[in-house]
Amino acid sequence: MLTELLILLSAFTILLYIRRTSRALSRRITETHNLLKKLERENRELQGQLGKAENSLNLSIVPSLPNRDWSFTLSFTTHGARLNSLSKVLDSISKQVLQPSKVILALTDSDKDLLTDQQRKFLDDHSVCYRDWETDRKSTRLNSSH
């Protein structure tokens, strides 16, 4: 009976040790996973910066490129279902080496009314001009018939 009790006590001690070890391993795995996510995020940022620097260097090395006029206007159209992606578009544009001198967003007045205050602020912060898409479309049709 004493032997069985010692075996049971030993088994219980081993189980407690395994449980404690598995919790410690689980914490280490979580910490490692979080660190990996952070490093991946930093790696993406560094790759973007490297690409931007590389593009900038290419613009200054090629003899015909530094003398060019790189100013351009970027115009794009969207609609209500895509308004949530505006911040991604403008963020991507702001990370480019060649920056547009003007950004124009064409959308209908009804879609413009769907913009949230946060989206309006984001567009204002990026100096985006608005154009009424329906008016532009009508004037384009009239001009193309001549």
Image: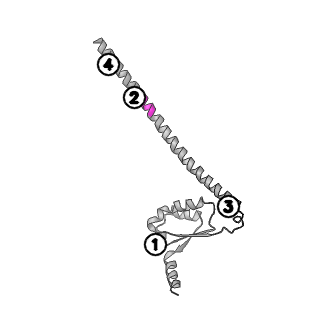
Q: What residue did someone put label 4 on?
A: 8
Above or below residue 84? Residue 132 is below
User: Element at badge 3?
Assistant: helix
* Magenta-tinted stretch: 18-25
Q: Earlier in the sequence, mark 3 or mark 4?
A: 4
Of the numbered discs in the image, which one, if any, rests on residue 19?
Answer: 2
Of the numbered discs in the image, which one, if any, rests on residue 100?
Answer: none
Real-space Cα separation, disc 2 to disc 4, in angstroms: 16 Å
Above or below residue 146? Residue 36 is above
* Left or right: 139, with 98 as reference point: left
Foreground tag (3 vs 2): 3
Dominant secondary structure (helix, strand or loop) of the stretch shown in magenta = helix
Q: Crowding near pointer 1: few (<14 within 10 Å), some, many (20+)? A: few
Foreground tag (3 vs 1): 3
Q: Earlier in the sequence, mark 2 or mark 1?
A: 2
x 54%, y 74%: residue: 131
Real-space Cα separation, disc 4 to disc 1, in angstroms: 75 Å
Tag 3: amino acid: Leu
Q: What percent of the width, then of the height, locates residue 33?
A: 48, 41
Q: What residue did someone put label 3 on?
A: 59
Foreground tag (3 vs 4): 3
Real-space Cα separation, disc 3 to disc 4, in angstroms: 76 Å
